Amino acid sequence: MTTSIIVLLILCLLLACAFEFVNGFHDTANAVATVIYTNSLKPTTAVVWSGIWNFVGLLFSVYLLSSGLGVAMGILNLLPSDALTDSSISHGVAIILAILLTAIIWNLGTWWFGLPASSSHTLIGSILGIGLAFYFISGQDAVNWSKAEDIGLSLLVSPIIGFALSIVVMFLFKRFIKNDIIYKEPIPGKTPPVWIRVILICTCTLVSFFHGNNDGQKGIGLVMLILIILAPGYFAIKADQFLPDTTQDIKHITELVYKMDTLKLGEKERSDIGKAKLKSIALLEALGTKTTVEEIEQKQRFEVRKDILQITKTAEKVGLGENSSLSTKEKTHLKSIIKNSKKITDYAPLWVVLLISISLGLGTMIGWKRIVKTIGEKIGKQHMSYAQGASAELVAAATIGMASAWSLPVSTTHVLSSGIAGSMVAKKGLKNLQPQTIKNIALAWVLTLPVTIALSCGLFLLFRALF
């Protein structure tokens, strides 16, 4: 790599760390609001504790969960491979700067006004803005719309789930816990009973853990986007991958693709299968009898990545689709092979995981006051009780955990805020909500995508013209 590329790479990595740092303190209130507001933990203790569990949650998701980097790769794959490279390095730099600056600007702006806004919406809007700008430039569809639909649905549904389940949990609390103190507002400066503190500290820990588990992966996806764009020869595919395994997986996928009855497929599906067959031939020829990634020329490694992603995408879409002629057993086998074959593309080096984990953990330890006040005092007409805080955080932790298991990004902010609102409604109905705060939060929710799409698109076009 040239000196200029190295400098740009370092600059972009620092901006990615800044995004994750801002994400940390922007979303800290989601985890610590209840323990601080109810005097269960002192603020400094709470944010440090939350920071530690954000760090642990990310490491756990990457190395111990079967979903691995599913959320990170979902973010990365919003942009098709063709949109990630260009004959000019300025294209890549413009993409990265537009995404990062848009995400940081919107996150800081909403934090400054104390609005619980979604870092997930912000990042996804920024990426979609790049896809839109790329379409203006090239006329090509530069957004993976099937992935965008999955992510959009998870972001839309998760707050509704948070709202509804919090009402249910509050009902269960009232049904089985008869101690009135849990339903009363915290007394300023007074520590709650030990059993309540234990519950609230546990829910704080769970939300912190699953926030790191889900949101931390978005930072990893950003860093991998940077590395693949600016240094594809080094990071497009996993450096220590044993290539015969990948070659064998591609052969198996190709065999199953050839086995499909194309007469049962639509015209578009037949065309995609035809392209996948040609890609498979070219890829298997490129891999040959090679055993290590070092044997592949650096300039060819991105093409290997692109071919693998296109082959597996087509095999997954058509081979597992409703028109597929494959048997149930063959579909299960194909799904397993596709997952294995992506080990060479869906990865992140250890230093990337640690870099994002540390940035998220450190960011969690500052900047919490503004949004804590909104969550604790301004969503409902009455201040949040112990039971309301615990129910909202239990629901948030469960929702985020399930989303991570299914490799879907969700907004911790929206899930918890809607959970708090649900717990308020469970007590006295909709009249217990503060209309102005709900309107402000809803406005931030509605505006995030269009604003970030427009800002990212504009910045990308500006940077393309300047560089």
Image (cartoon, rainbow, N blue to C red):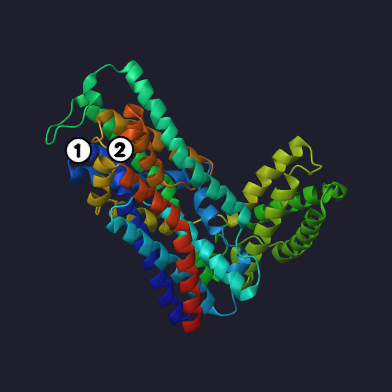
Q: Which residue is mark 1?
A: 41
Please give left or right for residue 255 compared with residue 236 in the image.
right
Do labels 2 and 1 touch, CB within 8 Å?
yes
Q: Is residue 236 visible?
A: yes
Q: Residue at x 74, y 62 (%)?
A: 279
Residues 178 and 5: in front is 178
User: Which residue is situated farthest in the left direction here?
Assistant: 189
Q: In the rendered view, tell whether residue 234 sits above or below residue 264.
A: below
User: Residue 123 at what x, y percent from top left?
Assistant: 45, 58
User: Residue 93 at what x, y percent from top left?
Assistant: 48, 74
Q: Residues within 10 Å of mark 2 (few under 14, many from 20)?
A: many
Q: Residue at x 45, y 52 (%)?
A: 217
Three-letter code for the amino acid on which mark 1 is drawn = Leu
The Cα atoms of the two marked residues, 2 and 1, are separated by 10 Å
Mark on residue 303?
Answer: none
User: Residue 34 at what x, y percent from top left?
Assistant: 26, 38
Q: In the rendered view, tell whether residue 130 sits above or below residue 118.
A: below
Three-letter code for the amino acid on which mark 2 is drawn = Cys
Q: Which residue is mark 2?
A: 204
- When asked about the image quadrant of residue 4, the answer is bottom left
User: Residue 459 at what x, y percent from top left?
Assistant: 46, 73
